[in-house]
Amino acid sequence: MNIPSDLKYTEGHEWIRVEGNVGYVGITDHAQHELGDIVYVELPEIDTEIESKEEATNIESVKAAAPVYSPVSGKIVKINEDLEDSSELLNTDAYGAYIFAVEMTDKSEIDSLMDAAAYEEFLEKE
Amino acid sequence: MFSYLPQTEKDIREMLEVIGVDSIDELFKDIPKEILMNTPLNIPKGISEYEVFKRMTELAEKNRQGISFMGCGSYEHLIPSVVGHILQLPNFYTAYTPYQAEISQGILQSIFEFQTLICELTGMEVSNASLYDDHTAASEAITMAVNTRKKADRVLVSGTIHPNTRSVIETFFYDVSIKIEEIPSKDYVTSIDALTEMIDENVAAVLIQTPNIYGWTEDLSGFADIVHENKALLIVSSNPMSLGLLKSQADWGADIAIGGTQPFGLATYFGGPSVGYISTGTKLTRKMPGRIVGQTKDVDDKRAFVLTLQAREQHIKRQRATSNICSNQALAAMGSGIYLSTVGWNGLKKAATMSFQKAHYLYRRLTEELGLKPLANKDFFNEFTLIIPESDKVLIDMESQGIFAGVGLSRFFPELKDAVTIAVTEKRTKEEMDAYVDLLKGVLNE
């Protein structure tokens, strides 16, 4: 299972990559594998204020529809529009394709997320 | 008549033995005695098929035949006989909905064609396979908007839409934290000033109907800009017959186009069934309720039709689904599809133009010769509202003489006591309209 060491992870199988004040959020390789072929990514609205653990958006696969929660609080400042026409990017490049980016209001929230080792352990227990 | 209960006393005894009870009454012992019926049902003895037929014919003859000028959502247009002929093919009318969808290529093709025709009429990019009626379509369109603008909790609905649409919307959102607010009208059309004042970024959708409940056509110039500046979606409901002559929803910049296709090939019956249509741009496709039929190629590279995007509600999204519509109004939609493909663009334009011209002929005679006042001086398509003094009595008098003269609006709006909405379709002849004028003149002079 591919779990890059430079990212942080949630129990909902989201990853977040921090660049300055902005966190880029996607779903993990494990999540895309469980969902199967992803056919639709509903992109959130830019400028939406969001709390950590609040549902940001939805993705649909051939098997299920799943919510994507924001790992951090802040404002959604970017969305990955490539996913509108190419939702399969979440399958083929789970860590390259972010879904949305949050300008964080409280950067310390990152500290409460799992690092790669902790997430790997979490996956084994699950 | 023949008894359709095939069990004999012996069958019943055997079944009771298998389940281990002594009598049928014992099956009902959990129901309190005081609410259990203790006398036999008061149903007359059976009569022969012939007697039933005779009785039903007598009842049917009590129906009053008349020439209809009633509209307000249901219109008596010409229906080519081929529509009824195809609808009565058992292959179509016995199939409730295609469960093994791809086996029913004929039905899927008819739905695909219906969708294509709706897109051509409304100018939108995608149509679903149809909904129950225009009122459901309005409610589902609002649901789409609310699911697109998740943080917005207001919906603005024009005061000039059909009151039935309004009440279905109220029911839909009864227990949901969405506020349905009415945009006031000015001279019986939607006030753009009121809209501008009311709208903000908490508004998810704005719903307007044109032609509106009074028959007046709404001038929607500038509406889309105001709505879009506030990130809301513009939903425009239209009698689709009017689209044969007037601007389409896409022309007005609407995000979602809705309405009912009853004017296309469906009789007025008792007000139904109609067919709801809903169409939109590709961006909102995934938010659309129900199902869409798509065109593809089979393994032999031949054209084939498939149900698409319906799985998400029933099989995939389940509790996360945004609509509970799983089926569509297939047979009636097929009727509308056959109508449109029979008359073609030219036929549709002709039916719309003739309805328009005839309605204006009757309007002119009633206002100029009989001096009746319109509810407002506005443009209209095929129906208009006049003030007819003592309208309740007049409508009954005219009905007793064979003319259903219009719909009294007081049934919807008690304050509009003598407002009568009069609809004219291409089916009405000059003689019928002249008879209307003469009869009304006589009734008014009594």
Image (spheres, helix red, strand yellow):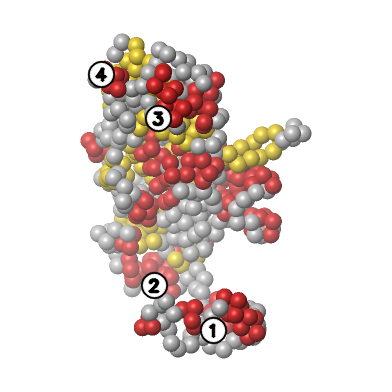
Q: Which residue is mark 2?
A: B397
Q: Label 2: state its secondary structure.
A: helix
Closer to viewer: mark 3 or mark 1: 1
- Residue type marked 4: Ser
Reading the image, the residue beneath label 1 is: B22
Question: With respect to residue A33, does B279 lie above or below?
Answer: below
Q: The disc labelled 2 sits on which kind of residue?
A: Asp
* Quarter placement of the C terminus of chain B: bottom left
For image coordinates 55% across by 42% down, the residue present is B311
Marks 2 and 4 belong to one chain:
no
Q: Label 4 lies in what chain? A: A
Q: Residue at x 37, y 51 (%)?
A: B172
Which numbered marker is on residue A12? 3
**Circle 2 or circle 1, nearest the eye:** 1
User: Quarter of the image containing the N terminus of chain B?
Assistant: bottom right
User: What residue is rendered at 34% in x and 17% in y?
Assistant: A23
Assign a secondary structure to mark 4: helix
The kind of residue tagged 3 is Gly
